[in-house]
Image (spheres, helix red, strand yellow):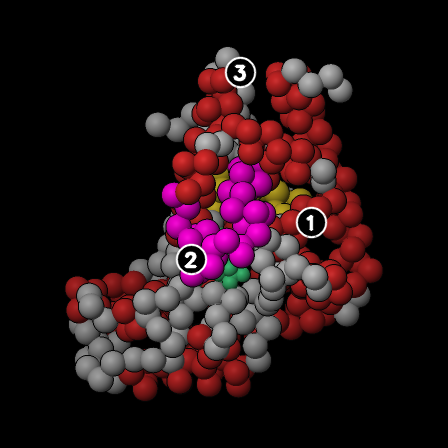
């Protein structure tokens, strides 16, 4: 059961500045971030410390700095409102790293051993993966709990990490006899876009790190690229079904319908009924038109914001100052509870 009412409602979420954000990041998380801003205060972090856990973000300082600005620009361009929400980059607020260390001592090896994302991302050679990739979920717990955040809007793939954050919060509360100190943060995983799949393979999640650019729609793609990727998206030879049940066993068709419903903010059943019995080509044209209409204004606004990197840096620095002012007292209290002289 949720213990959220014991704590002031507060949202925390973040994205890694590893490559350009894609449609999955947008529909699974960012779109929901924009909505939830109307219901509770929100903190949106560009998690640059998570980005160096993998080769894509490690050892490339200029690219990491640029990707950090791009992700911040994507947040704002997609509708994160700086009057309602804090936006900053993680490395600027030391409380994240300090709390993560304490959580490394709270979490158990067995808990981390179960994390499927580490298994997927480390692949066949887990001994070559960074220790940071392994302890990623404890840093994520620190990101959330440094603010005592109660709600975390994420895509389906982050559900297991969120459960670990709750376990860490619960164990800390028990171990230090402070039953309500940390809230048990609730995942907010809603809508038909919580798990957007690759356009080339309906069994694989759309991902920034997929080798094929045709597997994903980047938030920076222009209208031609979006339309071409949707036209080339893998499908099957059967006509479109007339009910949601007909999507079973057809992962590529299901993915395209999920994307349409999420972009249009319509129930998937209604979208299926609208295109019942038609060929994929007509549906793909309609989907391409919809995706271009929804995504190209975001790309244009990102370009406008990125033309003034100094302004983005000011937004991030200001956000970090305000985030640090919230996390600082929480961390001080944690240190006192642990017994650190500080
Ligand atoms: N395919 C997806 N469908 C729905 N939601 C998704 N998210 C990611 N992929 C999908 C959600 O986006 C948020 C930010 O993700 P992240 O930047 O922390 O990295 P990730 O989950 O590891 O995403 P990628 O694209 O797969 O990155 P790489 O390839 O670098 O690992 C999260 O809320 C996530 O759920």
| Residue 41 in sight here | no
**Quick check: marks 3 and 2 in contact, CB under 8 Å?**
no
> How many C-alpha atoms fall within 10 Å of the one at disc 3: few (<14), some, or many (≥20)?
few
Q: CA distance from mark 3 to mark 1?
A: 30 Å
Left or right of residue 41, residue 213 in this image: left
Q: Quadrant of the C terminus?
A: top right
Question: What residue do we see at 46% from left, 24% from top?
Answer: 171
Q: Which label is found at residue 176? A: 3
**Residue 240 to residue 247: above or below:** below
Please name which of the two marks, 3 or 1, marks the residue nearer to the observer: 3
What residue did someone put label 1 on?
89
Image position, residue 185 (x, y; %): 47, 34
Is 99 within the magenta?
A: no
Image position, residue 246 (x, y; %): 17, 69
Q: CA distance from mark 1 to mark 2?
A: 26 Å
Question: What residue do we see at 44% from left, 75% from top?
Answer: 215
Task: Give the magenta part as a residue range.
Answer: 114-142
Kindly state the secondary structure of the residue where label 2 is placed. helix
């Amino acid at each position: 059961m949720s213990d959220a009412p014991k704590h002031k409602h507060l949202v925390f979420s973040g994205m890694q500045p590893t490559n350009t954000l894609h449609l999955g990041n947008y529909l699974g998380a960012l779109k929901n971030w924009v909505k939830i801003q109307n219901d509770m205060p929100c903190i949106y972090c560009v998690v640059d410390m998570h980005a160096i856990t993998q080769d894509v973000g490690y050892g490339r300082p200029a690219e990491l700095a640029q990707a950090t600005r791009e992700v911040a620009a994507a947040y704002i361009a997609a509708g994160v409102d700086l009057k309602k929400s804090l936006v900053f980059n993680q490395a600027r607020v030391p409380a994240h790293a300090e709390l993560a260390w304490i959580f490394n001592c709270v979490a158990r090896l067995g808990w981390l051993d179960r994390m499927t994302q580490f298994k997927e991302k480390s692949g066949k050679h887990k001994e070559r993966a960074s220790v940071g990739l392994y302890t990623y979920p404890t840093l994520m717990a620190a990101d959330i709990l440094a603010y005592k955040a109660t709600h975390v809007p994420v895509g389906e793939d982050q559900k297991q990490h969120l459960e670990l954050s709750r376990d860490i919060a619960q164990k800390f509360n028990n171990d230090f006899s402070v039953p309500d100190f940390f809230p048990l943060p609730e995942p907010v995983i809603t809508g038909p876009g919580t798990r957007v799949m690759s356009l080339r393979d309906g069994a694989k999640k759309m991902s920034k790190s997929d080798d094929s650019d045709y597997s994903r729609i980047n938030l920076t793609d222009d209208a031609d690229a979006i339309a071409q990727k949707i036209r080339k998206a893998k499908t099957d030879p059967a006509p479109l079904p007339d009910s949601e049940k007909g999507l079973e066993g057809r992962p590529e068709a299901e993915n395209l319908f999920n994307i349409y419903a999420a972009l249009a903010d319509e129930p998937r059943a209604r979208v299926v009924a609208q295109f019942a019995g038609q060929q994929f080509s007509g549906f793909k044209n309609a989907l391409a038109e919809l995706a271009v209409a929804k995504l190209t204004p975001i790309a244009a606004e990102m370009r406008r914001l990125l033309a003034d990197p100094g302004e983005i840096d000011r937004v991030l620095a200001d956000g970090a100052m305000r985030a640090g002012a919230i996390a600082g007292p929480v961390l001080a209290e944690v240190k006192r509870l642990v017994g650190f002289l500080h």
